[in-house]
Image: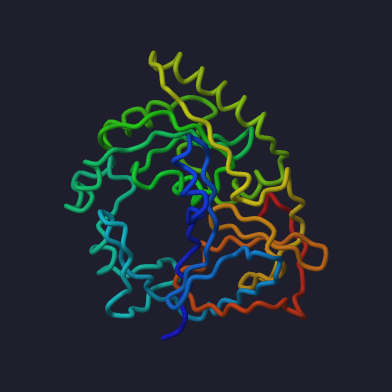
Amino acid sequence: MSNLFLGVQWRQSQHSAASVAAGPHTPQFAPWIITSQEAVPFFANSPRPITLVFSTDQRYCTGWRDITKHISHPCPDNAMVAPAYDTCIACKKRTGFNPAFYHSSTISPQQEQLNATPHTLYLAYFSAEVLKVGISQQRRGLGRLLEQGARSALILDVFPNADSARHYEAAIAKLPGIKETVSTSAKTAALAHEYTTETAQQQLHQALSRIQAALGTTFTPTFHDFSASHHAQTSYDLTDYTPPSVLSGVPLSAFGGQLLTTYHGSTLLMSTSHFTGYPVTITFAESADLSLTPKQIGLF
C-alpha cells in the first residue's frame, strides 16, 4: 500500500506541556505531517529543506476516527474513493461525526456521546476582516484553533455540552462582521495582511464588547496568541506558488494545513487539505527543477 497523506496534526510541545503547571499561558504547538506510515515534523531543530510530492491519480480512504476517544484507525478495506472525498461510506459511518449536527434530525450514537461532553466557545482571529466564532470539545483544547489556522483567539467560555455552546455560537454568528465558516482562500488572503498581537487582541476585545451588548451576557475570556507555534511573520508576500501537487523549500511558517516554505527567494504555500488520501513522497532535499507560476493571492 502506498504511503498516504493523512493531514497536518498540531501537537503540543513537550516542554510547553510541562510548563503549563507553572501558570496560565499559551502553550506552544508544532505541525507534524501525518502519513499512513510515519509522522514527520515540518520544522526541524535546525533549518533543513523538505519536499512533498503528491501522486493524484487515485485517492484512497483515510480511515475512521473514534471521536469519543480521539483515536484514528486505517480503513480496513483500503478503499479507493472519488476525488471529491477522502473517506469511504463505511468509514464515515464508523466515525459518525457530523459537524453540523444542529441541522440534522438524527445523529449517531457517537455524536450523542461527544455532544454530552463539555464544549468551548471561541472567537478566532485571522485578520481584521476575518473573525470566526466556533465551538469545539473542551478536551481538544487549543489544538482545534491551531488546526484551523487562527492567528490568535479569545476563549469565551466553557459549557457543559455542545447544545449549550451552540446556542451562543448561533447567536454570535448572526452579528455583522463575525463568520461561522472561513474558506481556505480567505485564510490565505488573510496572510497578506499585517498582523500584530496587540492589534489582534484589541480587535477581538472590541468584537467581544459588541457580542456581550447584543446578547446581554458577560463572558470571562482568555486571549491566546499563536505566533510562536506558527513561526509567524508579520505578513507574507505570496505571489508565487508551486505546481499543484509539489511543495519544496525550507519550512518557513504553518497555519492549520497550510504549509509555507522559502524556495530560491520566493515564499511558497500549499493548502494540504486538498491532498488527504493521496500517496505522498517526502524527502529532505530541495527540488532542483521546480518551476514557479505567478498567481494573484486573491485567486488562490
Question: Where the N terminus falls, by quadrant?
Answer: bottom left
35 and 258: which is toward the camera = 35
Q: Residue furthest right?
A: 265
Q: Position of residue 13 (x, y in %)?
A: 51, 54
The answer to whether 156 is drawn above or below residue 73 in the figure is above
The answer to whether 28 is drawn above or below residue 91 in the figure is above
Q: Position of residue 281 (x, y in %)?
A: 56, 80
The answer to whether 76 is drawn above or below residue 95 in the figure is below
Q: How is the image coloured?
A: rainbow
Left or right placement of residue 76 versus residue 258 in this view: left
Which residue: 53% across, 70% down?
A: 40
The answer to whether 284 is drawn above or below residue 119 in the figure is below
Which residue: 46% across, 26% down?
A: 221
Q: Position of residue 203 (x, y in %)?
A: 61, 26
The image quadrant of residue 197 is: top right
Report how many numbered discs are placed on residues in the image: 0
Which residue: 56% across, 27% down?
A: 204
Q: Position of residue 100 (x, y in %)?
A: 33, 45
The image quadrant of residue 254 is: bottom right
The image quadrant of residue 169 is: top left
242 and 231: which is toward the camera = 231
Left or right placement of residue 111 versus residue 256 in this view: left
Question: Where the C terminus falls, by quadrant?
Answer: bottom right
Q: Residue furthest bottom?
A: 1
Which residue: 67% across, 48% down?
A: 232
